[in-house]
């Protein structure tokens, strides 16, 4: 029997990968992909098991496939950002130390304190489009909101925000691995170096004159006498910018599109704003911004009877896990009241997204305010373009009438 092959690079699959996920889960849920040179996992239980298993490493440098080797070559040219392990790409004890240190400067209280400012930014963005009677959700709201928030958290002046966002967008281009064009790689490399130098200057300033921002917090953070090295501080600041930027943009964009295409659910949320928390969790499950993550086997083992060799990658398709009928009832149906909702849009295990509370807060405030202020909004066109990579799923634009 010929089974469906995992291939996220086909244009129609890039636009809507979910039918492919249905077939993979049914036909070949633990598939060896010749194209990716990895094991592709699409069932919820398999993915949660791998993400919780200490025998699988987040350090991609241990992987033995062309994607990993290409990524390693790319990273070597990215200066501090390429040579220094981050929370995202390390295992305990290094991961534990980095996460504890960063958590000290990234507390729930800090997120709580940001709520009024997030509301203010959303109101300002919507004030600017009200008279026109239309807006592009991505360009006018979802794109600027997270970059303003993270820039202010890091103590970046408003005049540098656009440049800041540009650097972040260019670096994200490398997520397509070997399929990244030489031109894109060069742009990303240049941006990584420029951003590194920019942050070096900011760190130097904050050492002399600390403020109430996250970088001052990272400098001050100490855990059992350990501090962040200069390179660790640089890469952590860069990681927070890049990881917290496009993902939140895509949560708001993908979420709004899902609501517009499911008008009964949009009405339900509009008529009962108290549903916003369960709605955001459902939108994360239904069409999450991060579609996949990888782990490297550190020893020979098996996944559901398939022999996985040391150095091979288990590619966990989070978007498929979140629509697994073995875990979620009517998984392809949007239900803003769904509870419980144990999705893996933020990953799982020790690498569960540190920025999840902030992303949730931004998503909740953006969508709740949008529906309150413009209760009759509608999609202007169905001819939408998906940007991003096969890892990060997001729209290039989302034009709506208010």
Image (spheres, rainbow, N blue to C red):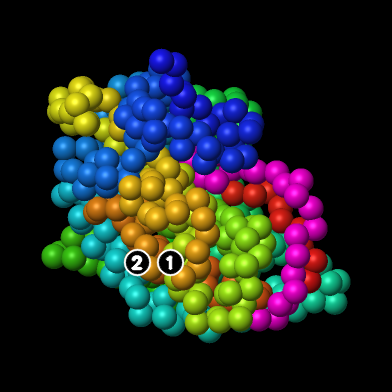
Closer to us: 89 or 65: 65
Question: Can you say which quadrant of the picture contains the C terminus?
Answer: bottom right
Q: Are marks 1 and 2 in contact (CB under 8 Å)?
A: yes
Q: Is mark 2 on a helix, strand or loop?
A: loop
> Residue 274's spot in the image, x, y percent?
50, 82
Quadrant housing residue 269: bottom right
Instruction: State the residue position of label 1.
Output: 338
Closer to us: 265 or 61: 265
Quadrant housing residue 110: bottom left
Q: Is residue 13 shown above or below 151? A: above
The residue shown at (63%, 43%) is 387
Judge from the rendering whether residue 262 lies leftward or rightward of residue 293; answer left or right.
right
Marker disc for residue 58:
none
Residue stretch in magenta:
372-393
Instruction: State the residue position of label 2.
Output: 340
Residue 15 painted magenta: no
Residue 361 makes an appearance in the image? no
Gap between marks 1 and 2 measured at Cα: 6 Å
Judge from the rendering whether residue 228 lies leftward or rightward of residue 239; answer left or right.
left
Quadrant housing residue 122: bottom right
């Amino acid at each position: 029997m010929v089974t469906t092959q995992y291939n996220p690079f086909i244009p129609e699959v890039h636009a809507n990968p979910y039918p492919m996920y249905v077939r993979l889960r049914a036909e070949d849920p633990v598939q060896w992909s010749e194209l990716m040179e990895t094991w592709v996992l699409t069932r919820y239980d398999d993915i949660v098991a791998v993400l919780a298993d200490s025998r699988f490493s987040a350090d991609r440098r241990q992987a033995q496939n062309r994607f990993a080797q290409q990524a390693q070559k790319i990273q070597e040219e990215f200066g501090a950002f390429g040579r220094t392990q981050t929370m995202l790409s390390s295992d305990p004890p290094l991961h534990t130390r980095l996460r504890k240190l960063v958590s000290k400067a990234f507390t729930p209280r800090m997120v709580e304190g940001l709520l009024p400012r997030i509301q203010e930014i959303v109101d300002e963005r919507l004030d600017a489009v009200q008279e026109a009677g239309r807006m592009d959700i991505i360009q006018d709201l979802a794109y600027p909101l997270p970059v303003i928030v993270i820039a202010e958290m890091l103590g970046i002046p408003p005049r540098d925000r656009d440049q800041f966002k540009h650097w972040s967008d260019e670096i994200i281009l490398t997520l397509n691995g070997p399929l990244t064009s030489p031109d894109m790689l060069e742009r990303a490399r240049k941006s990584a170096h420029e951003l590194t130098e920019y942050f070096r200057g900011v760190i130097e300033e904050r050492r002399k004159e600390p403020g109430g921002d996250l970088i001052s917090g990272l400098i001050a953070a100490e855990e059992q006498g350990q501090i962040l090295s200069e390179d660790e501080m640089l890469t952590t600041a860069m990681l927070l910018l890049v990881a917290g930027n496009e993902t939140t943009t895509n949560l708001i964009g993908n979420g709004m599109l899902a609501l517009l295409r499911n008008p009964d659910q949009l009405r339900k949320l509009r008529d009962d704003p108290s549903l916003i928390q369960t709605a955001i969790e459902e939108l994360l499950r239904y069409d999450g911004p991060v579609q996949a993550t990888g782990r490297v086997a550190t020893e020979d083992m098996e996944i559901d009877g398939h022999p996985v060799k040391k150095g091979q990658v288990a590619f966990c398709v989070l978007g498929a896990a979140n629509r697994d009928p073995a875990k979620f009832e009517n998984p392809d149906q949007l239900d803003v009241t769904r509870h419980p909702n144990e999705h893996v849009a933020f990953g799982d295990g020790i690498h569960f997204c540190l920025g999840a509370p902030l992303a949730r807060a931004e998503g909740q405030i953006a969508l709740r305010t949008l529906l309150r202020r413009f209760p009759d909004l509608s999609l202007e066109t169905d001819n939408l373009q998906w940007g991003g990579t096969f890892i990060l799923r997001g729209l290039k634009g989302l034009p709506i009438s208010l």
